[in-house]
Image: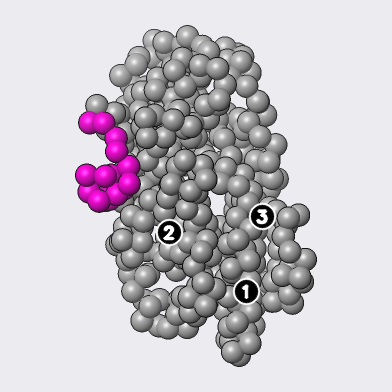
Amino acid sequence: MTVPQKRSKYLFVSMGPGETGQAISLAKYISKKGGRVLFSVNKKINLPFFKQDKSFKLFLLGTPEELKKIIKKEKPEALLLFNSKIWNRHKTFSKHPPFQEKSMVSISVDSNWLFNKEQYPKFPFTTWVDKHLVVFPKKVFNLGLKKNGGGFKISDLLLKKIIPIGFIPFYKKPKSSVISKRRKRYKIEKGEKLIFSYFSGFGASHRIFAFNNLIDSVEKLIKKGKKIKVVCVGPTDNLDEERLNKKWLTTKKSLSSNEYFLTLASSNLVFQHQGMVTLSQAISANVPVICNVHLLKKYSIPRLHFWEVKPFEKIGVCKMYSMSTPVKEISLAIERLLFNKESIRKMRKAQRSISQAGEEKAFNVLKNLIKENL
């Protein structure tokens, strides 16, 4: 007897804060479609995302062996790994799962092009999943490939397992009344501009240089008479006390997934490092973006974040600067994307041209895999 599709059970496993944001978005979509969702996170740092959301049965696990126990007990039809690099330093997980479940399909959900162990030996990925879903539109993904002028080389054999599905998360832009209410919460007065920034402190490590560049750039603009406020989300322990002590700066160590998006979507500009989850939310909210990336020369993965963001800059949905870009240049870019109507219009138009929700396509891939596996 086959299991009715609406009762299929999906086990989500998320890696870091960014992946948890992606997973929550897809989990909510699948729940609305009748799927039963189990949610597991492997870091306590992910738990704040759920402080206002009790929708899922939630597990905290730290090892593949604990995952094995959950699978044995819950018997899901589908396993979703949010990042194929999860547990990539744990023995042989990337090559061999610690469980044998022929009745279960598996996918990874990725926001990168790191499917080449020779090019990126420090990032082994799970080769045993049925499909790798990449959370970009196909146009963006293709621009990242070396054969199309990007920085990533992926074999033709592996490309057959990779499906670009669009952005996850992809939220609808809030109503103007919701945006107005959110801006009032942060005391944004008439004529003031709001910058939303995020520096996670997890997978990409804490981008202190990006925070410093943002604060110093805004300081220059405020001295020119510009009315700007900044909301910065992320850890503050290692930040410079003098830069933190600004009347126009509000810091939040963490926000729930809903609060995060609503605050981002109510801003006039997003300033971030290379985080793809924040970037996808900014695009779906049609908010201009500046990415301040690290070139990572010391990690033998030169220009990794540059190459990850470059396809988006080529399309025109964001501007990208590096750690060494002068503050004066970054400040001018912020000014243009806050006050120059033509610069704002042009970027928003580019964002709308590639706005593509990925939740429905991901769900359809899963449904088809489960059906084929019955």
In the picture as drawn, the residue positioned furthest to the bottom comes out as: 225
Work out how far the residue at label 1 is from the one at label 3, CA to CA, in angstroms. Answer: 18 Å
List x then y, in percent, for residue 93: 51, 19
Q: Which mark is residue 216?
A: 1
Q: Can residue 90 be seen in this view?
A: yes
Work out how far the residue at label 1 is from the one at label 2, CA to CA, in angstroms. Answer: 28 Å
**Is 274 or 6 nearer to us in this picture?**
274
Label 1 secondary element: helix
- Of badges 2 and 3, nearer the viewer stands 3
Label 3 secondary element: loop
- Of badges 1 and 2, nearer the viewer stands 1
List x then y, in percent, for residue 173: 47, 63
Q: What residue type is labelled 3?
A: Gly
231 sits left or right of 120 in the view: right
CA neighbours of label 3 inside 10 A, class few (<14), some (14 to 19), many (20+): some
Residue 56 among magenta residues: no
- Of badges 1 and 3, nearer the viewer stands 1
Q: Residue 234 carries which label?
A: 3
Q: Earlier in the sequence, mark 1 or mark 2?
A: 1
Label 2 belongs to which residue? 284
Which range is magenta?
A: 141-156
List x then y, in percent, for residue 344: 40, 76
Assess whether mark 3 and mark 2 are in contact (beta carbons under 8 angstroms): no
Vertical arrangement, residue 92 with respect to residue 328, above or below: above
Work out how far the residue at label 2 is from the one at label 3, CA to CA, in angstroms. Answer: 21 Å
Q: Is residue 264 visible?
A: no
Quadrant of the frame with the C terminus: top left
List x then y, in percent, for residue 177: 56, 72
**Residue 69, quarter of picture:** top right
User: Which residue is found at the position 51% from the left and 42% from the top?
Assistant: 299
Q: Earlier in the sequence, mark 1 or mark 3?
A: 1
